[in-house]
């Protein structure tokens, strides 16, 4: 298991201050553009959140540092595919006018989660399709941050489907199989 926290930061970039905190990964758009070097058409993918790339880099750097602190070596990318469990806690700054206890407004939690999964791909797992279990929550808290815990999924105690050709009585009585 590995645990680490990524804190929001402010950056000076091209003469202006940029806040780098938990960012949602929205929809991506693809366009055909002309490659400047070859003059040939190619596909280019754009995200609708320009701050996402900076946030992903922060998450990736923090994950690499956490693995290095845990193992004392640089094992990237991790090549062993494993079923991963990822638990995320997002802490967002509450606007001054907010009276509600929970941030039940944008950004969407699943979009925050998607940005983290893509940042951890190639670092803590080969592909985010390896994530089989997990949870996320978002709440108000200062400083803005995400707390990340990644572990290998435990072996399931009761498997719905088995490798044998026979169906057990307990599986046959499940309401889902009805």
Image (spheres, rainbow, N blue to C red):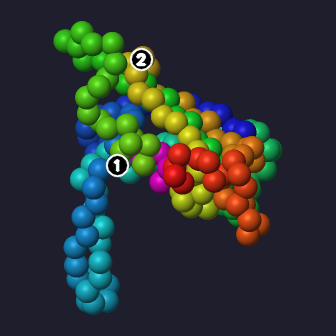
Q: Residues within 10 Å of mark 2 (few under 14, many from 20)?
A: few
Viewer-proximal residue among 101 and 36: 101
Which SS class for mark 2?
Answer: loop
Q: Residue at x 31, y 23 (%)?
A: 103
Quick check: 87 left or right of 65?
Answer: left
> Residue under circle 1?
25
Left or right: where 28 falls relative to 85: left
Q: Is residue 103 above or below residue 165?
A: above
Can you see residue 60? no
The answer to which quarter of the image holds residue 55 is top left
Q: Position of residue 46 (x, y in %)?
A: 27, 62
Task: Pick out the residue farthest to the left.
Answer: 97
Height in image: 53 above or below 149? below
Chain part drawn in magenta? 115-120
The location of residue 89, given as percent across then percent down, is 50, 29
Picture coordinates of residue 113, whole percent (x, y): 44, 43
Between disc 2 and disc 1, whose residue precedes?
1
**Residue at mark 2:** 141
Whether residues under marks 2 and 1 lie with C-beta atoms below 8 angstroms apart, the answer is no
Mark 1, other Cα within 10 Å: few <14 / some 14–19 / many ≥20: many
Q: Main secondary structure of the magenta part?
A: helix
Disc 2/disc 1 C-alpha distance (Å): 21 Å
Q: Residue at x 62, y 48 (%)?
A: 173
Q: Residue at x 52, y 52 (%)?
A: 178
């Amino acid at each position: 298991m590995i645990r680490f926290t990524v804190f929001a930061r402010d950056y000076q970039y091209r003469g202006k201050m940029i806040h780098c905190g938990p960012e949602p990964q929205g929809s991506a758009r693809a366009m055909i553009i002309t490659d400047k070097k070859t003059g040939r058409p190619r596909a280019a993918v754009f995200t609708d959140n320009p701050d996402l790339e900076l946030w992903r880099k922060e998450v990736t750097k923090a994950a690499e540092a956490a693995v290095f602190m845990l193992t004392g070596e640089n094992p990237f990318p991790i090549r062993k595919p494993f079923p991963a469990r990822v638990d995320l806690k997002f802490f967002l700054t509450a606007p001054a006018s907010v009276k509600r206890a929970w941030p039940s407004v944008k950004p969407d939690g699943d979009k925050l989660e998607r940005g983290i999964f893509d940042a951890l791909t190639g670092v803590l797992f080969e592909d985010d399709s390896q994530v089989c279990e997990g949870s996320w929550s978002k709440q108000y808290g200062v400083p803005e941050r995400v707390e990340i815990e990644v572990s290998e999924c435990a072996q399931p105690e009761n498997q719905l489907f088995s490798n044998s050709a026979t169906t057990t009585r307990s599986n046959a009585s499940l309401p889902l199989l009805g």
